[in-house]
Image (cartoon, helix red, strand yellow):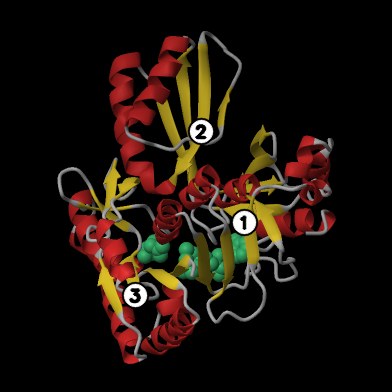
Amino acid sequence: MAVVVQKYGGSSVATLEKIKAVASKISKRREKGDKVVVVVSAMGDTTDSLINMANSLNTNPDKRELDMLISTGEQVSISLMSMALQNEGCESVSLTGMQAGIQTKGFHSKARIEDIDLTNLKNHLSEDKVVVVAGFQGVNNNGDITTLGRGGSDTTAVALAAKLDCDCEIYTDVDGIYTVDPRLFPTARKLKSICYEEMLEMASLGAGVMETRSVEIAQKYGVKVYVALNTGEWEGTYIKESDNTMESKAITGLSLSDKDLMVTIDNVRYDIQNISYIFNELASKDINIDMISQTAPAGGHVSLSFTAPKTDEKIILDILENVEKKIGNINVEIEKDITKLSVVGIGMRSQSGVAAKVFDILARNNIQFKQVTTSEIRISYTIDTKDRQRALEAVANEFNL
Ligand code: ADP
Ligand code: ASP
Ligand code: MG
C-alpha cells in the first residue's frame, strides 16, 4: 500500500462537474488500496478575482490582509472536494494549510515552507481517509495565514510528498511537460522525462506548468514528480534525476517570461560600495533579481541594469528612492515591455556553440536583444515584447523543439 500526493490545479477544479470527475478518479485510486493525500488549488480564476477585488478597494492592500483573502479560494475547493469524495462513498477530510501543519517563514505573499507537522494529517490517513489539503497556504510564527506565491499549490504538494517520503503526481490541463509551452508553440513535443535541473531552469524562466520552488524541493529531497492531464488520459512526463540519455541534445526546452521588468539606474558613482549597497537593499526586501549588467565606467559613473518581477515595481521604486538619499543623484528608468527568452538543456555542458547559434538566429530575424546571461545549462536573452512570438518560433524551429 503506497502513499501518494496528488495535486489538482485551478483549471482541474474550475467547476462542480470537474470537481466531481476528479473525486471519482481519486476514489478509484483509493479503492486500489493507495493512501491518497490530495492538494487542490482555488477554482479556476478565483485567486485573480480575489486579488482584483482587493485592488479595487485599496491600490496597495496590506499583504497580511491580502493573504487572509486569497487563501480563502483554496478553502472553498477543499471542502467541496471532500464533499464530492464523500458522495462517492470515499471517506475524506479537508484540512487548511494550518490544520495540515504547514509552517512558513518569510514575507506575506511569498512565504516559504519551513516545516510540516504531519501529526494531524497522519492520524487521518491512518483512519483510511483521503486527506484533502488546501494548497498555496500555511501559517507563520505569529499564527497568521501566509501564501506561498502564485502557483504555490505545486509547492504544497511536493513539500508534503517530501515529508511523507512518497511520489507526487501533478494533474493539470496539459498532458505533460513540453519542449515549449504548447499554447505558444502548438507543434512542441512532449517530453517523456526531464531532469530536475532542467525543469528548475524552465520553471524559473517562465514555464508556468510547475512552480519553481516546488521543483527546488523535489530536487533537494529526491521526490519523483509525475505531471499529467487531470483526466488521467495519456502518459505524462516524469521529473527526476538526470540519466545519460538526457544529454544527447544540446537544448531540451525553451521558456518565455513576461513577468519581469528591466530597471536601469544611470549616474551611479563608480564605487563597489555603492553597487553592493544597492543590491543589498534590494535583497533585504527579498527582491528576486535575475539579469544584471553594468556599463564601463565613464566620467566616474556607471549605468546598472537588472531584471526583477513586475509585481515588485512599487517596492523597488521605494527602495531606490531611499538609496538615492544615501549615494547621491541617480536616474531610475523602468522598462516593462520586455520578455525573457531562454533556452535550457543539460546537453549544453558538453556541446558548445549554442549561444552563437541563437545570436545568429536573432540576427537573421532582425531581433535586437538587451541583455544576455548564461549558466552552465541555460542562456537567456531579454528582448522587446513585440518580438516575442517571432523569436520563439525562429529559435524553436531551428532547434527542432
Ligand atoms: P494549474 O492550474 O493546473 O496549476 P497552470 O496553468 O499553472 O495549471 O499550468 C499549466 C499550463 O502551463 C499549461 O496550460 C501550459 O500552457 C503552461 N505551460 C507553460 N510551459 C509549459 C511547458 N513547457 N509544458 C507544458 N505546459 C506548459
Ligand atoms: N490559487 C493559487 C494561484 O492561483 C495557487 C495555485 O493555483 O497554485 O496562484
Ligand atoms: Mg500552476
Three-letter amino acid code of the residue under disc 3 = Asp
Residue projecting furthest to the left: 142
Q: Is residue 384 above or below residue 373?
A: below
Q: Residues within 10 Å of mark 2 (few under 14, many from 20)?
A: some
Cα gap from disc 2 to disc 3, whole angstroms: 51 Å
Quick check: can you spot residue 334?
yes
Q: Earlier in the sequence, mark 2 or mark 3?
A: 3
Tell me residue 293's x, y (percent).
57, 27
> Could you say which disc has been placed on residue 67 in the image?
none
Residue, disc 1: 239
Cα gap from disc 3 to disc 1, whole angstroms: 29 Å
Task: Classify mark 3: helix, strand or loop.
Answer: loop
Give the side of residue 334 with respect to residue 175, left or right.
left
Residue, disc 2: 306
Tell me residue 223's x, y (percent).
53, 53
Q: For residue 380, what is the image quadrant?
A: top right
**If the image is split into quadrants, where does the C terminus sit?**
bottom right
Residue, disc 3: 128
Q: Residues within 10 Å of mark 1 (few under 14, many from 20)?
A: many
Q: Residue at x 32, y 68 (%)?
A: 126
Q: For residue 393, what is the image quadrant?
A: bottom right
Q: Residue at x 53, y 77 (%)?
A: 230
